[in-house]
Amino acid sequence: MSPYDESIILPNDEHNQQLLANVHPADWINPEPTGRYNIVVLGAGTAGLITAIVAASLGAKVALIEKHLMGGDCLNVGCVPSKGIIRAARVWADLRKAADFGVHIPAGVKYDFGAVMARMRKLRARISHNDSVHRYAKQGVDVYIGSGRFTGADTIQVEGQAGNQTLTFARAAVCTGARASVPPIPGLQEAGYLTNDTVFSLTELPPRLAVIGAGPIGCELAQAFARFGSQVYLIEATHGIMPNEDRDAADIVEQQMLRDGVTLLCCGKDVQVQKTEFGKRLTVDSHGQQYDVTVDKILVGTGRTPNVDGLGLEAAGVAFDRRGVTVNSRLQTSNPKIFAAGDVCSRYKFTHAADAMAQIVIQNALFPHPLGLGYADVESLNMPWCTFTEPEVAHVGLYEKDAKEKGIELETYTYKLDEVDRAILDGEEEGFARVHIQKGTDKILGATIVAAHAGDLINELSVAMKAGAGAKTIAGTIHPYPTQAEVNKKVINLWRKAHFSQGAKNFLVKLFAWMRR
């Protein structure tokens, strides 16, 4: 049986046993290869799973190779467990402000961090059925548990429980994902640290926690742990948090995190770590002031490194570098028979991006252009994303700075949530919706939403952009009242009002005066 990192599947309770039974069953026997595969997929994260199951549903002969856990990061150590913890932390935060809603919670109410983590493991195990070895096998996919390595331009060797097996293919897809990047901080390796691979195995709340990196992973988990009562120090090399987002959007989240008890040490320099008898000692310079703090755990959330090592890519003639596998806009590698999708080749490290890229691989790898279907192009993807802090920050399309770099003239409109009735009634009025519309048209080129449900609200704007519907379509769409989604129509109405000229108004005034005669 192929090894996996047991540290991410702890504790050994019934929930994790159920998870393993689905995504890495101990009794699994790899099939015997019979003939050439239409496509062999290396890696069973989101990109690999979608590629494999869609190809099989179309009638292709498919092999799927996974050395670790089916479901990849998203199921096991990413989206699923993190959102389970974030939801529980929000419940606890809501209890603390219940009096604002006229609800009085008796003194002495407590939370149980161990129960929070057990709930997460239970739900993760339940969801894991969707990504299970047995489900994929029933759908016609030959699932191989073991390490896959290219041995030639059209062959892959699988090292599994029964020894080595060689698979031949007409096409292949590299979908091996990425892993946590660890910065070269002096003393960090010796002191020990957590990443997203290991943090979800905790059963006790660390009283003191340092989080290195204030991107999406760092911010989401720093806020969640702080809400449960950890003393959290969030260390970021740049100014503020979420450096890729609009500054005023990130500032709203930053202020909420400070209220939640997070200590932000931004513009952090000269970080050093030392293991002591009292814990892990960190020294860092932030805005010219030297900080010296001791914590129980350190969580690293400083980005992702593509998994390209040990795949035999050289033997297959597949080009790669530190950024991952090199692909063209069709997701084709330097070997025209081999494609790639997901975190191993994409700057968008999102589950939904991997899903979308898998669809492109299917069309381009299995349906050659001469059939008249045309090539699918990754450059045409309209990619939204969301950071699931409270409030959430969601974005799609261009930022204002992107448009300036491209020489595109924009009109930008921002509508605050404290003018949206439902947001006021929900007590969730911190935030805004912002749209960027190409000057002289109604074409929406980008949007940012900061709101409690920003990840849901951004979808309407994403659909409009994908369909080329434009601002006029949203302005003419009826939105139920009262909903927070009204903010989308209200921000578009700012554009509509701006384009109602004084000349048009003067004409109507004269028209209405004439009609009164």
Image (spheres, rainbow, N blue to C red):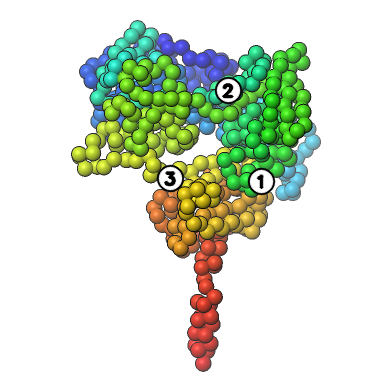
Provide residue 224's location: percent of width, then percent of height: 65, 33
Can see residue 146?
Answer: yes
Q: Secondary structure at mark 1?
A: helix
Q: Which residue is mark 3?
A: 382
Provide residue 220's location: percent of width, then percent of height: 61, 34
Answer with the quarter of the image where residue 494 lies: bottom right
Of the two numbered discs 2 and 3 on the same chain, state the one appearing first in sequence.
2
Say whether marks 1 and 2 touch (CB < 8 Å): no
Q: Residue furthest right?
A: 107
Q: Is residue 11 above or below residue 370?
A: above
Of the two numbered discs 1 and 2 on the same chain, state the one appearing first in sequence.
2
The residue lying toward the viewer, choosing from 393 and 207, is 393
Inter-mark Cα distance, 1 to 2: 28 Å
Q: Which residue is mark 1?
A: 252
Q: Is residue 373 above or below residue 141?
A: below
Within-10-Å neighbours for mark 2: few <14, some 14–19, many 20+: some
Provide residue 139's location: percent of width, then percent of height: 32, 27
Task: Kindly identify the residue that appears in the image at 47 percent across and 57 percent down.
Answer: 438
Within-10-Å neighbours for mark 1: few <14, some 14–19, many 20+: some
The disc labelled 3 sits on which kind of residue?
Answer: Asn
Q: Secondary structure at mark 2?
A: loop
Say whether marks 2 and 3 touch (CB < 8 Å): no
Q: Secondary structure at mark 3?
A: loop
The disc labelled 1 sits on which kind of residue?
Answer: Ile
Inter-mark Cα distance, 2 to 3: 30 Å
The disc labelled 2 sits on which kind of residue?
Answer: Val
Q: Which residue is mark 2?
A: 182
Q: Residue furthest left?
A: 370
Task: Kindly identify the residue that appears in the image at 53 percent across and 14 percent down.
Answer: 6
